[in-house]
């Protein structure tokens, strides 16, 4: 509610004045929230996950591993809010809700006698001080690539927002603080410059002779073979990050294995839509991929299959530069492309699609602005062995229109409904 008020105020005061006052406003809210809920992070282990890609998946993996180790976890990420066995979807259209929400969530985790809280922390959350007055015990850095550039002003400012979380870790009052970084990412050294007690890195080399195919991932961690039903090299990195942190907390390899092998699905992240109808002989996948890098990683996972790809882009002034870049990736890896509406906010949805078109040089694309109809058409085109890849929204609960309009939405639900319709008449 307070953020809605802030958006209204923004329309009536000069941009320079608003930008000058906003940090004071956000910092003040963070402090008041911590005071109201009595600085709950001081009384529980708090693990944060940050990076451009893989935050939600890594946090889900951490929760599963620690639960396999007998711990009671609380989890706050883009997908859901979970305290112990009580879980509900995150329908807030933001990774980290307001400062009061986060502090209240941590207090509820303390009161529920959870052993730890696992938080997904985004650059936008850091920019608005939503991580302030949260005493961290550990941080996992997944990777860093350009995103939210128009919001932050530059890649360097985006990077600094992420690094402010590492700085917060170094200033934590906790007796032992740990940072785990992706040693294969070119920005990893920046996250090691804050003098934390313990620093660990992980690399694809740690996985040994790994296997990655449509049946899942198989790799070795600390002399223990782990076979996960999740697919993709990006998920291998996420698992290595989660396993490395869990190991630093003393979790034995057999419980790391149990936690990772027991996690069969992460909602909205390479989520396979399967029908009980035996006529389905192709893949339908919903994924949150919304950058050129994450699109490429997803498409490479289905190498060797004909790919029918449904994608769009986000409006509201969000990283317009990446629209043709994502199109270039689809042009390179997809066999057929259907462009559709995603989250236009206050922009003309057709203009967003037009901004993507220069990225296509090889493929003749189909434009179907109605997202349900686009998904239906993609599934209708699928033949045996093909893969229908629906990207951009994952578990997002709304299509965002002008003036804050929210149309309830679920890619998973719509894809399942359209799949069933098509299989019935096959």
Image (cartoon, rainbow, N blue to C red):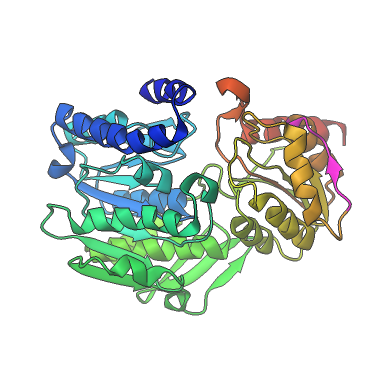
Give x and y (percent) for residue 158.
44, 54
Name the side, left or right, on which 349 lies relative to 404.
Answer: right
Instruction: State the quadrant of the C terminus.
Output: top right
| Magenta: main secondary structure | loop
How many marks can you see?
0
Give x and y (percent) for residue 233.
55, 65
Residue at 55% x, 35% y: name it.
Answer: 396
Residue 262 in view, yes or no = no
Instruction: State the quadrant of the N terminus.
Output: top left
Give x and y (percent) for residue 289.
60, 50
Vertical comparison of 247 with 73: above or below: below
Name the side, left or right, on which 363 lies relative to 261.
Answer: right
Q: For this rendering, which residue is in front, 86 or 242?
A: 242
Vertical comparison of 252 with 37: above or below: below
Q: For this rendering, which residue is in front, 351 or 278?
A: 351
Q: Is residue 370 magenta?
A: yes
Q: Which residues are magenta?
A: 364-371
Residue at 56% x, 43% y: name it.
Answer: 268
Residue at 39% x, 33% y: name it.
Answer: 17
Give x and y (percent) for residue 293.
60, 60
Vertical comparison of 14 with 170: above or below: above
Q: Is residue 411 magenta?
A: no
Residue 193 in view, yes or no = yes
Q: Locate residue 164: give its quadrant.
A: bottom left
Q: Locate residue 33: give its quadrant.
A: top left
Q: For this rendering, which residue is in front, 74 or 277?
A: 74
């Amino acid at each position: 509610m307070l953020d809605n008020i802030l958006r209204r105020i923004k329309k009536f005061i000069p941009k320079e004045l608003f930008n000058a006052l906003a940090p004071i406003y956000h910092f003040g809210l963070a402090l008041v929230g911590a005071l109201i809920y009595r600085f709950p992070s001081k009384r529980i282990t708090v693990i944060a996950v940050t990076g451009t890609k893989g935050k939600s998946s890594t946090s889900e993996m951490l929760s599963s591993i620690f639960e396999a180790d007998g711990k009671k976890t609380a989890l706050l990420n883009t997908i859901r809010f979970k305290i112990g066995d009580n879980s509900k979807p995150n329908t807030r259209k933001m990774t980290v809700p307001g400062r009061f929400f986060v502090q209240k969530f941590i207090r509820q985790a303390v009161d529920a006698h959870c052993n730890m809280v696992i938080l997904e922390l985004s650059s936008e959350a850091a920019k608005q001080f939503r991580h302030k007055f949260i005493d961290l015990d550990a941080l996992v850095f997944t990777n860093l690539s350009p995103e939210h550039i128009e919001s932050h002003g530059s890649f360097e400012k985006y990077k600094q927002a992420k690094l402010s979380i590492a700085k917060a870790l170094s200033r934590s009052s906790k007796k032992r603080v740990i940072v785990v970084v992706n040693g294969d990412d070119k920005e990893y050294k920046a996250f090691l410059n804050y003098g934390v007690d313990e620093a660990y890195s992980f690399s694809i080399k740690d996985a040994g002779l790994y296997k990655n195919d449509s049946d899942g991932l198989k790799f070795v961690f600390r002399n223990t073979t782990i076979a996960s039903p999740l697919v993709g090299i990006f998920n291998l990195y996420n698992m290595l990050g989660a396993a490395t942190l869990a190991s630093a907390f003393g979790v034995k390899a057999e419980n790391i294995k149990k936690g990772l092998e027991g996690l069969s699905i992460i909602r909205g992240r390479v989520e396979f839509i399967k029908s009980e109808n035996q006529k389905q002989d192709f893949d339908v996948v919903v994924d949150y991929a919304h950058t050129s890098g994450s699109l490429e990683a997803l498409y490479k996972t289905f190498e060797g299959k004909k790919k029918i790809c449904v994608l769009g882009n986000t409006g509201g002034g969000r990283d317009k530069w990446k629209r043709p870049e994502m199109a270039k990736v689809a042009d390179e890896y997809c066999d057929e492309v259907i462009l559709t509406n995603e989250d236009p906010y206050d922009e003309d949805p057709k203009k967003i699609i037009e901004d993507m078109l220069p990225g296509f040089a090889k493929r003749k694309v189909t434009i179907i602005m109605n997202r349900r109809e686009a998904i239906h058409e993609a599934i209708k085109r699928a033949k045996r062995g093909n893969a229908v890849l629906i990207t951009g929204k994952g578990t997002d609960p709304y299509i965002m229109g002008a003036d804050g309009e929210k149309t309830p939405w679920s890619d998973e639900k719509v894809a399942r409904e359209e799949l069933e319709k098509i299989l019935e008449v096959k």
